[in-house]
Amino acid sequence: MKLQCVVIALCLGVGVMAGKYSREVNEAKPSGSDGQTVDFRIAKLNQVWEKAKRMQLSPVRQAELHSDLKIQEKDEMQWKKMKVEGLDENGEKEAQLRRNFNVILAKYGMDGKRDTRTLESNSLKDHDTKEGDIFDDPRLDKLWNKAKSSGKFSNEELLSLKREFQHHKDKIHEYNILMDTVSRTEEIHKNVISPLEGDTKEHVLHQRHTELKHKMRDLNQGFERLRKLSHEGFTEDSEFREPRVIELWEAAKRGNLSEDELDSLKEELRHFETKVEKHSHYQEQLELSHQKLQHVEALGDKEHIKRNQEKYNTLAEKTREMGYKMKKHMQDLSNKISRQGLEHNEL
């Protein structure tokens, strides 16, 4: 009898452990090996975050990565629900999520590759780096230096313009990452044997080429805006100051929306711009807090270090939280603008 009880207990134990480990394949444990609570429910995202902390990315870059991973987590959890309900039969959403994840890895230098995705243009080979060239792209540097020396901009306007240039530089970098991802997918596609699998990959490739085409169009329009701003300066009736908000507003105006819809969206974008500006302010404070912490650590006063570390940790957490909310809001606005534009085009 005692032997039977032992056997039953062992079987139950094995069953529980099997269930536990099968769940842990895809979802992270509530706490890490050091007893601390993990940041993400999906194991691979947690692994990326832990690797980023070991890489010692700057505080602002870490906060940005954390926000991007939170968005990825939200999208992947939604996809899991879709999959259970049978709403992603052709795997389109799954392919997009995989591509988004690869872009995140590449964006933060975590894809195991040396980053050779330079900001290219037709004149790059003839471009000698000079003092004052800060955007790694000859066309951007030429425009920026011209605007800076034109006398048309106040100091505050120059800061706004510089943010737009930096945003455009980031978009070029992301475009090159996506183009690199598509190229690698095409190499894999060449080795496909199964016709069915080939059809699926063909669809994914077509989708990515379409996305590349749209991003290139946005880049061209963005550069044209920078060129116009650099020559003419800001106008009195400029609707917005933040590059990401300006980009959404320009997309909305191209979307054939009604005047009422544009007015409603404009109000929503004003609220969003306040959120973006607040997030930027917190990023600046985070960087300053990190510099102060480093200074205090060099002095070696343990009590002083502890107080500054606590302040820094609180600020880092707040910056990450605000970054996630801001990026989620931007994602929602972008989807809303795309959906409304599509509805109008179908009428």
Image (cartoon, rainbow, N blue to C red):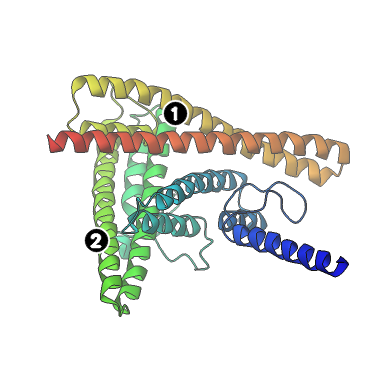
The disc labelled 1 sits on which kind of residue? Answer: Asn
| Mark 1 crowd level (few <14, some 14–19, many ≥20, 10 Å Cα) | few
Residue 16 horizontal/vertical position (percent):
69, 59
Rendered residue at 83%/66% (across/down) = 6
Rendered residue at 45%/60% (across/down) = 102
In the rendered view, does 221 fall on the left or right side of 5?
left
Q: Say which residue label 2 marks.
A: 206
Q: Say which residue label 1 marks.
A: 155
Residue 314 horizontal/vertical position (percent):
69, 34
Nearest to viewer (mark 1 / mark 2): 2
Q: Earlier in the sequence, mark 1 or mark 2?
A: 1
Q: Secondary structure at mark 2?
A: helix
Q: Nearer the viewer, residue 177 or 97?
A: 97
Q: Secondary structure at mark 1?
A: helix
Note whether 147 is above or below 47 in the view shown: above
Snapshot quadrant of residue 45:
bottom right
Residue lying farthest to the front in this orientation: 1
